[in-house]
Image: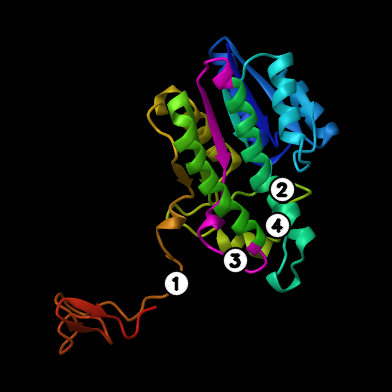
Amino acid sequence: MTHVLVTGAASGIGRAVAGEFASAAGEVSGTVLTLVDVDEERLEAVADQYDTAQVCVDLAEPDGPEKAVRRAWESVGEIDVLVNAAGVYPSLDMIDLDAAAWDRVFALNTRAPALATAALARRAVAASRAASVVNISSGAALRARPGGGPYASSKAALEMATRAAALELGPHGIRVNAVSPGFVAVDSSCNPVAPEYAAAVSANPLGRPGTPADIARAVRWIAGPDAAWITGEVLRVDGGSGTGASHLPRLWPPDPAPGGAPGDGGGESGSTSDSGNTTEGSAT
């Protein structure tokens, strides 16, 4: 039996992850799920849809992650895969920040995954069992956005926690990775997104926004046996948006002919060279 525990499973990416593993259960016998969320009504609906166990708990509370893991372990069985998908994305300017607001974001986005991982690891090590953990990060971990400072900071911290856990738990057969989505539109009352924002951040080389299903498939892969020699990694699933800023204008028009514009020597405007070290004078 493979027991998969998914947090934040009542909506958004967490719900898609639950559906992805539920489909796996239909294809391969022996996969069971436990779904965790604070929204009892929506959680019950998803659990009924996929015929899974459920644990309603507030993961932002200090003892929430331990409760979720303990109840799932004791009622369903040893946990093989933990997917930490619960999170919140408030719009909050840094100038308006206070301690309570900062702590709310970090409690759910960073502390809860770390504590859930620790709760699983203690039980898995005691039982001499391997396990796989997948944390849901964000492209915001690498790129701050107006109004998203606390969220971006929480996801950057989560990525380091992922690496630290992978380093320490690897000798026990516990893999810890993260999946970092680009912009994905989700139906979430606690994380509403304005259409203008969605349009602004959806640009990527593949030409479309991501879907929760795109992320769920990546989670299932990196959690599974095909990724057995991968740990401590952050898998970017973003349509290529992390490769660069394709929506920005060119620094200058294309060269009229091979070799560069007449008289410019084919180099960049404002560049000088000194003993092989290039100093850019115009590019930012």
Q: State which quadrant residue 235 falls in.
A: top left
**Quadrant into which the C terminus falls:** bottom left
Q: Which residue type does callout 4 highlight?
A: Val
Q: Secondary structure at mark 2?
A: helix
Tell me the residue at 53%/54% (across/down). Answer: 139
Of badges 1 and 2, nearer the viewer stands 2
Residues in magenta, as a range = 124-149
The scheme the figure's colours follow is rainbow
Q: Secondary structure at mark 1?
A: loop
> Where is residue 218 drawn, in percent x and y?
49, 35
Q: Secondary structure at mark 3?
A: loop
Q: Earlier in the sequence, mark 1 or mark 2?
A: 2
Q: For the residue carrying disc 1, how many other residues have a C-alpha within 10 Å: few (<14), some (14-19), or many (20+)? A: few
Q: Which residue type does callout 3 highlight?
A: Arg
Q: Which residue type does callout 2 highlight?
A: Ala
Residue 250 placement, left or right of 203: left
* Disc 3: which residue: 145
Please tell me the numbered disc located at residue 193: 4
